[in-house]
Image (cartoon, rainbow, N blue to C red):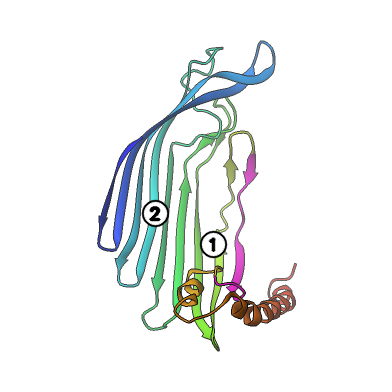
Amino acid sequence: EVGAKFHWGRSGTSLSLFQISKPYGAVDPASNRFGVNGLQRHRGLELNIYGEAARGLRLLGGAMLMNPKVLDSTTGQNHGLRPVGATRRQFNLGAEWDLPSAPGWTVLARASHTGDSYADASNLARVPSWTVYDLGLRYATRWGNTPVTLRATLDNACNKHYWKQGQYTATLGMPRTVAASASFVTALGYQTNLMVYGPGGYSLRDFVRIGLPLTLLLVATATLRVPIAWPF
């Protein structure tokens, strides 16, 4: 692997070229046994960006283009094909925007794309590419002397139906999912808690003493209210 990293102000970029070679596992048609059946090589380019693009707007993303191939196959029948589950492209971009008119509120967004792949060594069963979009909202505040962070997320907002193909197994992609969380009990639960932990002179006991009752209250409230909003 060879690459370069660039940093300017509050933003940065890294670019790298890589080559990975590892044993290729497949079923030997002569013996009908699974084992090492050659070599697979992954060559590609990876680009990452991170930092604050504008005041209150933070970006984190990456792109990968790859050429995976089966080489030196002992049977010769899969030579030059793609290994099972290997994609040629992946793209991810996430953003956080602090709302200037609403202090403490942050809008979250993320887009993820994975290219097509194959579910079999002969490259006959193609798994289509997929793209999902996630949305979220975060609120950082204080309840008394306790810093509190509330989050709500909507994963796979467009309810995309897709398969995630691994090296040996395929799983259904997560459907549209609503989730919420809160960080009360520990200073390590979220970076905002950690930032005020030292300057505020807090101890871990302070977070447990105030945060544990709040967490139990949140769990009880969610247990009662969620089935009303979204009946099972």
Question: Mark 1: which secondary structure?
Answer: loop
Report crowding for label 2: few under 14, some 14 to 19, many 20 or more residues within 10 A (C-alpha): some
Nearest to viewer (mark 2 / mark 1) = 2
Q: How many marks?
A: 2
The residue sitting at the left extreme is 8
What amino acid is labelled 2 in the image?
Answer: Gly
| Magenta residue span | 170-187
What amino acid is labelled 1 in the image?
Answer: Ala
Q: Is residue 122 visible?
A: no
Identity of the residue drawn at 54% across and 26% down: 123
| Residue 162 horizontal side relative to residue 13, left or right | right
Q: Is residue 156 above or below residue 195?
A: above
Identity of the residue drawn at 63% across and 33% down: 168
Residue hosting label 2? 61
Report crowding for label 1: few under 14, some 14 to 19, many 20 or more residues within 10 A (C-alpha): some
Q: Nearer the viewer, residue 21 or 34?
A: 21
Residue at mark 2 to residue at mark 1: CA–CA distance? 19 Å
The residue sitting at the bottom extreme is 144
Q: Nearer the viewer, residue 160 or 187?
A: 187
Point out residue 72 in the picture as x, y percentages from the top left corner: 48, 15
Point out residue 1 in the picture as x, y percentages from the top left corner: 36, 34
Identity of the residue drawn at 55% across and 72% down: 187
Q: Is residue 133 visible?
A: yes
Residue hosting label 1? 157
Question: Mark 2: which secondary structure?
Answer: strand
Q: Say which mark, if any, is on residue 98.
A: none
Point out residue 3 in the picture as x, y percentages from the top left corner: 31, 40
Q: Is residue 89 above or below residue 60?
A: above
Would residue 208 be counted in the magenta stretch? no
